[in-house]
Structures are given as C-alpha cells and as structure tokens.
Amino acid sequence: MKQDLTDTQAEILDFIVKYIKREQLPPIRSEISDFMGFSSDNAAQEQLIKLEQKGWIKLLKGKARGIRVLK
C-alpha cells in the first residue's frame, strides 16, 4: 500500500494519476517539478526513480511522457 511511500512520493503519484485521467497521457518531468515546487526537473526524476523502485510506476526509457502507473 501507499504506506511505503514518503509524503512527497504519494503526492507525486496522486498528481500523475489525476493528470492521466484528465489529459489521457502522463505528465512530463517539468510539469511534475512545477506542481511540486522543485527547483529542477532532476528532483522530479529522482522521485520518479524511487517510485519505480518501489513498484508503483514503470518509466519508459526515451519517452518524455514515459510513465506508466502499475498499482
């Protein structure tokens, strides 16, 4: 369940799910970074990697919108 996520990771995951429902495609890193108030897109990428390691998403290499929600 979501208890294995930090508050930041849970917020990003919720943003991704809602974004996909609304736009029919996943957000790009800069949209996640803007939403979260991060100073760089690398901060968003680091959190996405952690979400992938925990099995919540799959990152598709070479695609700007390459995020697939698994759970």
Image (tube, rainbow, N blue to C red):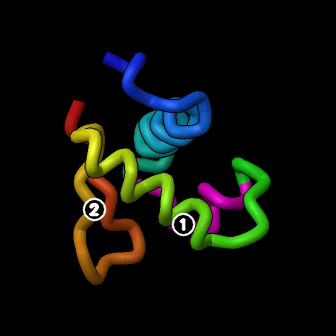
Which of the pair 65/6 is nearer the observer? 6
Q: Quadrant of the C terminus?
A: top left
Q: Find disc 1 in the rendering and name its residue.
A: 29
Side (left or right) of 43 relative to 54: right
Q: Does residue 7 sit above or below 50 in this rendering?
A: above
**Splitting the image into 4 quarters, where does residue 67 fall?**
bottom left
Mark 2 burial class by Cα count in 10 Å: few <14, some 14-19, many 20+: some
Task: Determine contact: label 2, label 1, CB under 8 Å.
Answer: no
User: Where in the figure is residue 27, as x and y percent of width and height?
Assistant: 50, 58
Amino acid under label 1?
Answer: Arg
Give me the C-alpha separation between circle 2 and circle 1: 11 Å
Q: Please report the residue visible at 48 percent of the width from the left and 49 percent of the height from the top.
A: 23
User: Where in the figure is residue 70, as x and y percent of width and height?
Assistant: 21, 38
Q: Is residue 22 visible?
A: no
Q: Is residue 30 visible?
A: yes
Q: Most prominent secondary structure in the magenta stretch?
A: helix
Q: Please report the residue visible at 54 percent of the width from the left and 66 percent of the height from the top.
A: 29
Q: Please report the residue visible at 42 percent of the width from the left and 44 percent of the height from the top.
A: 20
- First in sequence: mark 2 vs mark 1: 1
Which secondary structure lies at badge 1?
A: helix
Q: Which segment is the magenta one?
A: 26-34
Mark 1 burial class by Cα count in 10 Å: few <14, some 14-19, many 20+: many
Q: Does residue 51 sit above or below 29 in this rendering?
A: above
Instruction: Give me the disc on residue 16.
Output: none
Instruction: Give me the disc on residue 59.
Output: 2
Amino acid under label 2?
Answer: Leu
Which of the pair 25/60 is nearer the observer? 60
Q: Please report the residue visible at 27 percent of the width from the left and 49 percent of the height from the top.
A: 53
Side (left or right) of 35 relative to 53: right
Does residue 53 belong to the magenta stretch? no
